[in-house]
Image (cartoon, rainbow, N blue to C red):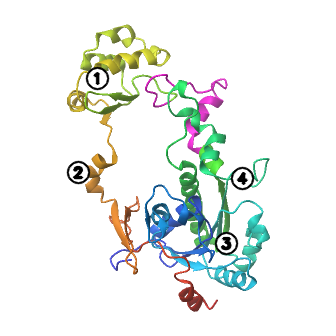
Amino acid sequence: MSAAYDPPLAGLVVLDLSQFLSGPYAALRLMDLGARVIKIERPDGGDLCRRLYLSDTEIGGDSTLFHAINRNKESLALDLKNPADLQALKQLIAKADVMIQNFRPGVIERLGLAYAQVRKINPRIVYAGITGYGEHGPWVDRPGQDLLAQARSGVMWLNGDEDQGPVPMGLAVADMLAGADIAQGILAALVRRGVTGRGAHIQTSLLEALVDFQFEVLTTHLNDGGRLPKRATFRSAHAYLSAPYGVYTASDGYIAIAMTPISKLMALMQIEELALYAADPQSWFTERDAIKRIIARRVAEHGVEHWLAILEPADIWCAKVLDWRELMQSDAFRALDMLQTVEREDGVRIRTTRSPLTINGARPPVSRAAPRIGEHTAKIRAEFGL
């Protein structure tokens, strides 16, 4: 960290015993806030995410996904089936502030590293655990994987058009949300520890994170006679919102139009066919497919910039739909300064994102790429006397 930057978690040690995405994402957020993250990996292959490829690109022998989510961490290679290595980890736990694990229920207990056992080693530690479906119930032993969690959460019935069947989200959203949730719990526990000196046990699961993610629409479902969501059959963007909410094809691209009175849109876009619905807001939902098809025909007659020039000055909520190239070429994106290059002494260089947070006007300055397996083992053992 640069001398001018004062990260709020500086001096805290986080032990990251997790793999893949959810736990490492939480550790990444803490690292960006200044914590020192020591990643505990198996000597024979390390985190399985090192070989979880999103494309045929690898950097320094590891996947781009691993690099993205493990930048600036240290790697300590330990075989937890080896009594000497397990004892070394327990010595490290005694000096740590946070421990994160996402083993399947039962595994951490067999290792002798469940919260009740770890608390005896270090009563001040904030211990965080992420599972697939919680600690109890009939799904406990099912694989806690993102797509499977999405499948069981109901979220797939909110995406796509009504006739498409269940549509998964195109990101590992369960992992990312669970990681963000557990990081929030860790931060709260650290605040309380600063007052009371006591540690805490923070838990969540992929399923709990996805249920919480849907809290708005689930609240509607629970108080609306238990009716299931019904997506639009045309250009659906939200199962519970009326027309014109959606994405429309213009002559040269796509435009998104959010919540807007149909009467106002009718006048601005000169769509006389909408007169049948303009004065009846209830119809904007009950007849949303018909309304959206009418709007779509009109939008297709001109380019995106034509419609933005009409709609934006009238304070209509709309936007051009950008791909990544267009986003990164925009002045708005450049102003955020969200990209960085991280490097490693062996010549590995990777372009990646930065923390979404600014603290006192500055983003966390991180410059080191993800570690090699066990890269810091000798250094950490010497420093902590393991």
User: Which amino acid, by three-letter code, is at mark 4?
Assistant: Gly
Mark 2 lies on a secondary structure that is: helix
Magenta span covers which residues? 212-238
Between discs 3 and 2, the one toward the N terminus: 3
User: Which amino acid, by three-letter code, is at mark 1?
Assistant: Ala
Q: Position of residue 5 (x, y in %)?
A: 36, 74
- Dot 4 corresponds to which residue? 134
Relative vertical location of residue 8 with respect to residue 220 in this rendering, above or below: below
Mark number displayed over residue 100 = none
Mark number displayed over residue 198 = 3
- Dot 1 corresponds to which residue? 300
Q: Is residue 352 visible?
A: yes
Is residue 372 shown left or right of residue 93?
Answer: left
Mark 1 vs mark 4, CA separation in Å:
48 Å
The quarter of the picture where the C terminus appears is: bottom right
Where residue 193 sits, quadrant-wise, is bottom right
Count residues near mark 3 (Cα–Cα under 10 Å), then give few for <14, some for 14-19, many for 20+. Answer: some
Mark 1 vs mark 2, CA separation in Å:
27 Å
Q: Is residue 344 magenta?
A: no
Between discs 3 and 4, the one toward the N terminus: 4
**What residue is shown at x 54% (from left), y 56% (from top)?**
180
Report the label total.
Answer: 4
Mark 4 lies on a secondary structure that is: loop
For the residues carrying marks 3 and 4, which lies nearer the camera in this image? 4
- Dot 2 corresponds to which residue? 331
Q: Position of residue 243 (x, y in %)?
A: 42, 22
Count residues near mark 1 (Cα–Cα under 10 Å), then give few for <14, some for 14-19, many for 20+. Answer: some
Count residues near mark 2 (Cα–Cα under 10 Å), then give few for <14, some for 14-19, many for 20+. Answer: few
Mark 3 vs mark 1, CA separation in Å:
62 Å
Looking at this view, name the residue that lies furthest to the top.
276
Mark 3 vs mark 4, CA separation in Å:
24 Å
Is 139 in front, or is 52? Answer: 52
